[in-house]
Amino acid sequence: MIQQTRPSSGPAVFVDVDGFEVSVESNGLPPRSVLVAGRPLPRYAPLLMGASGLVTKGGSEAAHLVEVARALGVPTVVGCDLEGVRTGGGMLVAVDGHSGAVHVLDLGH
């Protein structure tokens, strides 16, 4: 869990989660999206500009991507259990970096 000042929410953009990978590096994230990644890889750092949150399945709170998120004030939760979360479109994610809470609403069903 990473301490941040405010909870935030937005549509989920999944990158490299359980074999599901979307190439968003060239286009960036849609505004106010929550980046959901399997691991906090440095190559995702440019995607944090304008992001409303970061959630990773694994990794360390000392990872470069997490440090960038902290510097940008992006609410972040590291080590989130994404079991049962459907990857793809139609997901709204709320991230509270202070409490470590991540809420997922599946708008596709």
Image (cartoon, rainbow, N blue to C red):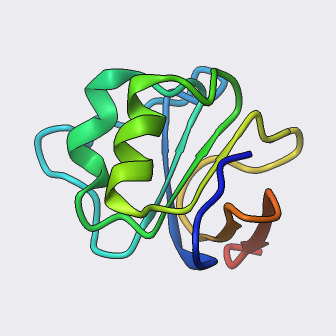
Q: Residue at x 20, y 38 (%)?
A: 25
Q: How many marks?
A: 0
Front-most of residues 42 and 64:
64
Front-most of residues 94 and 97:
97
List x then y, in percent, for residue 41: 41, 22
Q: Is residue 27 left or right of residue 39?
A: left
Placement of the N terminus among the 4 image quadrants: top right
Front-most of residues 32 and 16:
32
Using the rendered view, name the quadrant where residue 104 is placed: bottom right
List x then y, in percent, for residue 39: 56, 24
In this picture, is 74 found above or below 1?
A: below
List x then y, in percent, for residue 10: 51, 76
Q: Is residue 54 left or right of residue 51?
A: right
Q: Is residue 70 left or right of residue 23?
A: right
Please, which residue is most extreme toward the left here?
A: 26
List x then y, in percent, for residue 44: 32, 34
Q: Residue at x 58, y 74 (%)?
A: 5
In this picture, is 19 found above or below 98?
A: above
In this picture, is 79 found above or below 28?
A: above
Q: Residue at x 37, y 75 (%)?
A: 32
Placement of the C terminus among the 4 image quadrants: bottom right
Q: Residue at x 20, y 42 (%)?
A: 46
Front-most of residues 21 and 50:
50
